[in-house]
Amino acid sequence: MNAGVDDRRSTILRAIIEAYIDAAEPVGSAYLASLPGMGVSPATIRNEMSALEGEGYLHQPHTSAGRVPTEKGYRRYVDELMTSADPGPDRAGQVQGFFAKAHQEIEELLSSTTHLLTRMTDLAAVVTGPSAHRARIVSVQLVALSSRTVVVVVVDANGSVEKRTIVWPGEVDSGQLAEIGNAMTAHFREREVRDVDSPPRFEDPELDKLGAYAFVAVREAVREADRDGVFIEGASRIAASFGAVETVRDVISILERHYLVVTLMRSLLSRGQGVAIGSEHGVSSLRECAVVVAPYSVDGVEVGTIGLIGPTRMNYASAIGVANLVSENLSRRLSEG
Amino acid sequence: MNAGVDDRRSTILRAIIEAYIDAAEPVGSAYLASLPGMGVSPATIRNEMSALEGEGYLHQPHTSAGRVPTEKGYRRYVDELMTSADPGPDRAGQVQGFFAKAHQEIEELLSSTTHLLTRMTDLAAVVTGPSAHRARIVSVQLVALSSRTVVVVVVDANGSVEKRTIVWPGEVDSGQLAEIGNAMTAHFREREVRDVDSPPRFEDPELDKLGAYAFVAVREAVREADRDGVFIEGASRIAASFGAVETVRDVISILERHYLVVTLMRSLLSRGQGVAIGSEHGVSSLRECAVVVAPYSVDGVEVGTIGLIGPTRMNYASAIGVANLVSENLSRRLSEG
DNA sequence: TATTAGCAATCAAGTCTACCGAGTGCCAAG
DNA sequence: CTTGGCACTCGGTAGACTTGATTGCTAATA
């Protein structure tokens, strides 16, 4: 409980974790003693290491090896020991440059954001699209594809477009379609997607029936709006991070199940966790991975998430720094105008 | 040149390849002689194997090992030796059942088709969406997102929806937007996407200017139409197929570059090749892989491709059979109505 | 009391050797 | 042309031994 001892011990833990992140090899006392700041002998460090192991922060693969951080060790590192996650001006510039030049559609923007993330961190990157539930509907239109099929197109205020193709109950009449579309637009305009609960009503009973029919398509279209917008990139970096092909398979197999990744990220954010290490997140196939998440917002409302996934010995400072940096820039970019 | 010898030799080659596909281990003469059909001694088989090696169909990893097929060996197997790629009634039923139950949007349909493919073959699967170049445009609409931004929505006869968000040159006037949208729809209706070359003209010079401005967005929207529709699944199966993490990384890294995969598949199809083995396709990162492709068509016109990617020692008969089967069913499904 | 030097103990990994066994190539006999 | 027999090759495994990294402990020291 002596502050001095605690301090030195923490310094040693931090040094071990950083060395391990760097080299992926167990860290020994001799190396630590040789570090500039460390004014003590290997023997002293060994005592501290032994204590740290007793406290559960370190683990010794075998007697004649150095120490390796445990999950608890990484956790303490992330919570207390890590030095500022400031990514530095060069990286900040890189991100700003990216967002300054990016003027594509939102889907392309998010997709290339995953690319940016994976390139900057060498981790797998995830960006989930703005949750559509809070978006306001701007337009509903019915377009005839053939004499029997109609596509219902819904545009929301984010600029997202959802659609649903349906078989029309009867011969398509373009006048009717236009009328129903206009009524839908008037009915739903400025309402949030999650409030799509009942169709507009029409005086004409035939129109009313068709309107109710089309409404089902609108509801389905917006209900699935969230499914589309998940962008994951960098699975190949995972392959490079792990030696065991088994692990690679497990992790990539999770990354392929987008909804699972989204669920994981959302649940982490809702618990207020920015970093989940190893078994903390409960997905057993990712037990050798850590996940870093950051929300991004549009006009002050958190609507989506940014995530990074990599081995537990990832560079947390860099990952967290980049995630936050990108999150800020993306939020600003999406909020402007 | 004696038919009898050639026949036996071919039988042996086929047996070797099938055994190797099955067990992934070099095949020896004793095992081959023990096979039911093979009425000859190991010594005889050894002679044939030696000849086959001389002809370039087999390779011997080292003196005391059995033989392994070369690319040339697989090629001959696929071209001549392989027994019918008929996937059997159970699998045919599985695929038919899938397409009978599937009634989602085309994107979801294609995406779940990759899922079906990867599940049935245990290979990575690719489905490219119907090429938009030949699709007819059905509707163009301009929707105001705010007083300064407009989203241009283009619907084609496939039911695909493309959009482009633009900053409007001036205050948005919903009457103008509607008028321009209607004129665009009239102008482009029934024209193919690749024929989008000039905007409709308006009497009113202001409208004409705005129309020309919006036209750029239409052109960009349809130009990128093809980019969206690529669905790839099963990268994790690749991880399971190769022992070396290096190879896994290389292959998955290619799979992540969708446009590269699409280009590869298209160029194979345009050369009339249904199967590319190892270095045949020229993508060096995929030199340990084979690619199986099959086109699918809508109303008799080939519009998209189905692909399977796996190790060169994949089960070609099964892969080709499934690819063709799915291609037929998908074509039928997309052509009806 | 905290630190340190010294030293014995531990153990993975590398090296060396021997050997086994799978598989071949070749030869001579059928 | 086919086959049995046999010598030969060579990867892989197992065991013995060495090396080197690293620890824990103890006793001396500040």
Image (cartoon, coloured by chain):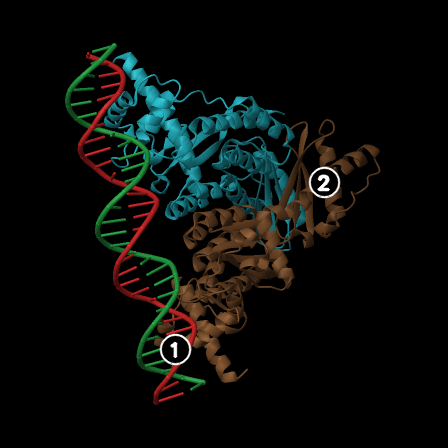
Chain colours: A cyan, B brown, C red, D green
Q: Nearer the viewer, residue A305 or A211?
A: A305
The residue where tag 1 is placed is: B43
Quadrant of the rendered image containing residue A139: top right
Q: Residue at x 39, y 79 (%)?
A: B37
Q: Amino acid at mark 2?
A: Gly
Quadrant housing the C terminus of chain A = top right
The residue where tag 2 is placed is: B181
Where residue B271 appears, x then y in whole percent?
64, 62
Q: Is residue B239 visible?
A: yes
Left or right for D4, reference A187 = left
Mark 1 neighbour density, 10 Å: few (under 14) some (14–19) many (20 or more): few
Mark 2 neighbour density, 10 Å: few (under 14) some (14–19) many (20 or more): many
Where residue A216 appears, x then y in whole percent?
52, 45
Where residue B105 appears, x then y in whole percent?
54, 50
Quadrant housing the N terminus of chain A = top left
Mark drawn on residue A127: none
Q: Residue at x 33, y 24 (%)?
A: A13
